Amino acid sequence: MEHGAFDIRLGTTPDRDALRWQFVRSNGFGAFGDPTTTTSYTFCAFESPSPGATNVLLEASAPAASTCGANPCWSVGSNTIRYHDPAGASDGIRTVRGRGAAGATRRWSVSGRGAALPLPSVLPAGDTISAALVAHDGAAFQNCWGGTFTSPSVNSTTRYRARQ
């Protein structure tokens, strides 16, 4: 079983743009990798205006081994990872959090805000948006967690909000 929430907002100015995504998968598929050394995470969202067609809305990365000021952005504990960049220097991403043991329920969240978020100037009018967090070591794919949102509670040219 999986469920999630997705909220993307275009602010009145780009510095007020915002993103929040949460995702839970009960089978715990996939390992976290090691973001303190080699595993980067990329969050992406895209719309499907018609069967077989997709338009990328957002692609933002939290790079492996990155530093935020004088400190590492990434921290890793037993069954948890965390990226924390208060400035959102990398594509506007402020936090990435993952927790859960291998084979157990995995919980993910991503948040970002500000002018560095690579958002379009207008959100699409379609009801279906897919969002995913992809773990990769360089060009080598490692894991992907995500889902499709089809029944938004808010859907306008400046905001899309949905649960699955």
Image (spheres, rainbow, N blue to C red):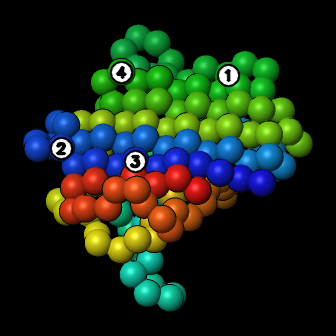
Q: Are the residues flagged by discs 3 and 2 in contact, CB closer than 8 Å?
A: no
Q: Callout 3: 10 Å neighbours few (<14), some, many (20+)?
A: some
Q: Are the residues flagged by discs 4 and 2 in contact, CB closer than 8 Å?
A: no
List the residue tagged with mark 1. 76
In the drawing, does residue 145 fall left or right of residue 47?
A: right
List the residue tagged with mark 3. 7
The image position of residue 103, as x and y in percent, is: 89, 42
Q: Which mark is residue 153?
A: none
Earlier-in-chain disc, 1 versus 4: 1
Residue drawn at (77%, 32%) of the image: 100
Q: Quadrant of residue 94?
A: top left
Which secondary structure, mark 4?
Answer: loop
Looking at the rendered image, the quarter that the N terminus falls into is: bottom right
Q: Nearer the viewer, residue 38 or 9?
A: 9
Q: Nearer the viewer, residue 62 or 8?
A: 8
In the drawing, does residue 98 fall left or right of residue 30?
A: left
Earlier-in-chain disc, 1 versus 2: 2
Disc nearest the viewer among 3 and 4: 3
Residue type at the position of mark 2: Gly
Residue type at the position of mark 3: Asp
The number of numbered discs placed on residues in the rendered structure image is 4
List the residue tagged with mark 4. 86
Q: Callout 4: 10 Å neighbours few (<14), some, many (20+)?
A: some
Residue drawn at (59%, 49%) of the image: 4
Residue type at the position of mark 4: Pro
Where is 20 relative to 51, above or below?
above
Which secondary structure, mark 2?
Answer: loop
Disc 1 from disc 4: Cα separation: 18 Å
Inspect this view and state whether residue 146 appears.
Answer: yes
Inspect this view and state whether residue 130 appears.
Answer: no
Residue drawn at (72%, 19%) of the image: 77
Disc 3 from disc 2: Cα separation: 12 Å
